[in-house]
Image (spheres, helix red, strand yellow):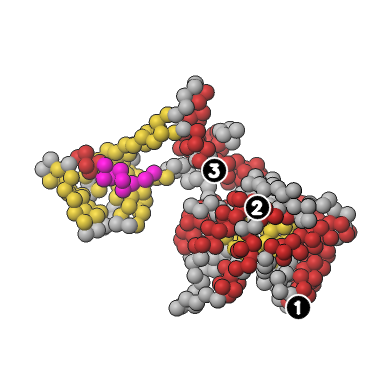
Amino acid sequence: MTMATDKRLHDRKFVRTFFTTPTAEKGEDDSAKKLRGAIGLRGMQAPDVWVPDNEDATAPSMREEGAENIAEVVAEDGADFPGEIHPRVVWHRDSPETRYDGFQQMLTIADPQKGAVENIDGFVIPEVGDIDDWKKADEFFTMVETEHGLEEGSLAMSVIIESGAAEQAMTKLRTEMGKPDNNLQRLFMLVIGEVDYTKDMRAITPTGSLPEWHEIRHNTSSAASAAGLIGVDGPYDDIRDVEGYNERMKENQAKGLLGIWSLTPGQVVEANTNPLPPQEGYWLIDADGTEVELDQDGETWTYRGGDISLEESGDDYVLTVGVDEMELDEDELRQELLDMTSYVPSLDDIVDSMEEFEAAKEAGKGAIAMTRAATISIDGVEIDISSDRMWDEATYQALQTPITLFQDVYENRPDQHEDLAEIYSEDVVERAMEVGS
């Protein structure tokens, strides 16, 4: 009997941040120095999932020591770490020897005598292949649990999608999970490893840079949704390009891929805060193909760029966008500006709308109109715009995701309560925790 599911099987509904750390470095007085630094992170600098990385981030000659370091550091300080801990061990779909080494690393780290396993949530398996390879990894997890007297299925398994075979395997999860011959219900995260994926796909770009791989992001998000798992995007190597990192997250979120790999504590902060609703709502305008944030001047929202101009011409107006010039009456201009603008709601705005709909539903109404209005100023010319959006149960459910994310963060990351209250205010946080329940 199979068990197809799109329900979340783990306590965490979302993972915003996947942060890797080398497990052992040669030449240091303490080879576990970076592990000790990472496990001490708190608040917005601490990831939702911390990955002591005993694979790519650690030299092969240091991996045996790295496994011991993980056990030691997590035994000492893992109980106080605010996120989940999922070490990455070695694995490869084409190498039985590498798979055996990964099994030995898991045995070392999960040994109850070392005192770390009670703070270990699972392991991350890289370089997986077809679905049979995933099952091999799952069997090793079961053997580790059996060897150490742990509850079957207590160690979560996450995989890194680094090959075409692994991408194809994701499509089979929905029917494979829950079969009597596997424990794939232990799967937790599907993580994109785009560097090795590029190599496996034999892809070439003129500059040697990585392709954008929109498809693998979509496929991973879709597979995670279908199988009740969590999708996580791969690393963004240009650690100084904060704007690019945030733009990548924005694109991902539109695909339902809310988590991303973080390479530095600075990227962790960006990835922890980026998916959350903004502190203040704001208006955007489409300036000849580029979305530009309008400046707030009291009750007015002002465009200050050079791609849009507006002037009065008698009773009409001349609106220029790029090279396109339009002569419009006031109603036509208002409609054109409505089409060009959009509003990004704050957490407070979202809570207000949800509370209003909940009150209407309690009063027996199935749908209500929500009005959004603004005064737009371009070149000193001001125009009032407003639009109505119908809210019904489907709209309510669709727009509940940002609140569900916020509630999941608040429930699982008490170390971030003070940060969240500082960003949004205690009142807004309390109301956000009440709506939708």
Q: Would you say residue 80 is visible in this rendering?
A: no
Q: Secondary structure at mark 2?
A: helix
Q: Is residue 436 left or right of residue 125?
A: left
Q: Earlier in the sequence, mark 1 or mark 2?
A: 1
Residue drawn at (53%, 51%) of the image: 256
Can you tell which of label 2 and label 3 is closer to the viewer?
2
Can you tell which of label 3 and label 1 is closer to the viewer?
3
Q: Is residue 199 left or right of residue 344?
A: right
Occupied quadrant, residue 88: bottom right
In the rendered image, residue 421, in percent from the top left (x then y), is placed at 56, 41
Residue drawn at (77%, 73%) of the image: 96
- Looking at the rendered image, the quarter that the C terminus falls into is top right
Q: Are marks 2 and 3 in contact (CB under 8 Å)?
A: no
| Residue 401, label in figure | 3
Marks counted in the figure total: 3
**In magenta segment, residue 340:** yes
Q: Which residue is mark 1?
A: 61
Residue drawn at (22%, 46%) of the image: 380
Along the line of sight, the residue nearer the viewer: 234 or 346 = 234
Q: CA distance from mark 1 to mark 2?
A: 38 Å
Q: Which residue is mark 2?
A: 174
Magenta segment, which residues? 335-343
